[in-house]
């Protein structure tokens, strides 16, 4: 029996002066698998007392109940792929769906989990590990050979980084559990921010007397290295995917990003001057 049938039967029994509990007992004994609950019958009894005798459910205006469609799943997937740091509330606002529905789309339909992103190299290869150890040994030998005073006045450090307008960036991301391991790489980010290049030194010195610690990621990297070689500039090698071994990443950029947080600039030149 369907709901209209049960409502009709319940209405007739009420008109015959039967109590709600008695009617529920009769229904339960005859239709144990589909019988409405006692609370449902009590609600129907209240509606009948108010003169509401409709057997069919009234059509309610508003958003359809079924919102977990393939189209909505695809829309949510595109948003989190473009920005994995979006909260479920922001995604819900973009797609005009309830936050609870979006959360189910993310976790159940897309199989994502809200994880805390950590800036660490992902699965070093054996070559990366060997190169990292060699880099640390070279840095230690460099310090032992030249001393602290010499490095303080002759070591040049060059690096670059993105400076975002709002550094309170959400560190939680939507990600698939146990994703395939990939090597980290530096990718462009189209978020609002300024790209600054840092070059630090203590005093003015001759180029051939300095040590340069930096990396070149431009397509003209070979020209950059040839230029330094012709001028007898000794380069301090860096280990790839190791921001903890970069002086700029460890100290300079962290301080600059804190000082420049929330500042607005008219152009790249103004941002560069402010960074200095």
Image (cartoon, rainbow, N blue to C red):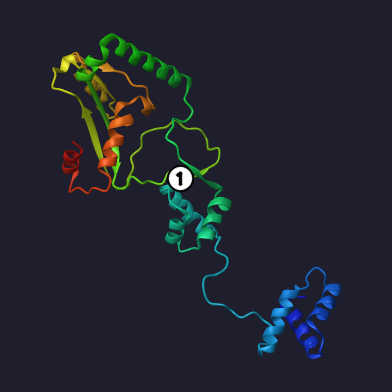
Rendered residue at 33%/21% (across/down) = 238
Taking depth in this image into account, of 5 and 220 the one nearest to the observer is: 5
Above or below residue 175? Residue 121 is above
Considering every residue shown, the one lying at the far front of the view is 149
Rendered residue at 80%/84% (across/down) = 19
Q: 10 Å neighbourhood of mark 1: few (<14), some, or many (≥20)? A: some
Task: Mark yes or no: residue 234 visible.
Answer: no
Above or below residue 90? Residue 59 is below
- Residue hosting label 1: 172
Q: Indicate the quadrant where residue 137 lies.
A: top left
Is 239 left or right of 100, judged from the image as shown? left
Q: Position of residue 271 (x, y in %)?
A: 19, 42
Is 10 left or right of 74, judged from the image as shown? right
Task: Mark yes or no: residue 68 visible.
Answer: yes
Secondary structure found at label 1: strand
Is 167 left or right of 270, judged from the image as shown? right
Q: Position of residue 73 (x, y in %)?
A: 52, 56
Rendered residue at 86%/73% (across/down) = 29
Q: Position of residue 95 (x, y in %)?
A: 45, 61
Is 6 left or right of 151, judged from the image as shown? right
Q: Indicate the quadrant where residue 177 lies.
A: top right
Rendered residue at 46%/45% (across/down) = 173
Q: Position of residue 224 (x, y in %)?
A: 22, 23
| Labels in figure, total | 1
Above or below residue 199? Residue 111 is below
Give the position of the N terminus as an image quadrant: bottom right
Considering every residue shown, the one lying at the far top of the view is 145
Give the position of the C terminus as an image quadrant: top left
């Amino acid at each position: 029996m369907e709901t209209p049938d049960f409502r009709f039967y319940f209405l007739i029994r009420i008109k015959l002066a039967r109590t709600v509990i008695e009617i529920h007992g009769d229904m339960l004994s005859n239709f144990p698998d589909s019988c409405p609950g006692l609370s449902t019958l009590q609600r129907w009894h209240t509606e009948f007392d108010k003169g509401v005798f409709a057997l069919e459910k009234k059509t309610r205006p508003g958003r359809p109940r079924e919102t977990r469609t393939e189209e909505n799943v695809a829309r949510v997937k595109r948003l989190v792929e473009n920005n994995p740091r979006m909260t479920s509330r922001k995604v819900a606002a973009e797609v005009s769906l309830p936050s609870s529905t979006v959360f189910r789309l993310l976790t159940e339909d897309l199989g994502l989990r809200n994880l805390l992103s950590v800036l660490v190299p992902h699965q070093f290869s054996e070559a990366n590990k060997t190169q990292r150890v060699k880099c640390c040994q070279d840095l230690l030998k460099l310090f032992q050979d030249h001393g602290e005073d010499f490095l303080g006045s002759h070591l040049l450090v060059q690096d670059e980084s993105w400076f975002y307008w709002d550094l309170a960036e959400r560190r939680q991301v939507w990600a698939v559990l146990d994703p395939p391991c990939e090597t980290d790489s530096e990718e462009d980010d189209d978020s609002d921010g300024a790209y600054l290049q840092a070059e630090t030194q203590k005093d003015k010195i001759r180029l051939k007397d300095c040590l340069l610690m930096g990396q070149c990621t431009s397509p003209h990297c070979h020209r950059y290295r040839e230029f330094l070689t012709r001028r007898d500039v000794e380069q301090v090698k860096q280990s790839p995917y190791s921001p903890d071994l970069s002086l700029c990443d460890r100290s300079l950029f962290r301080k600059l990003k804190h000082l420049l947080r929330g500042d607005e600039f008219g152009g790249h030149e103004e941002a560069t001057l402010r960074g200095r």
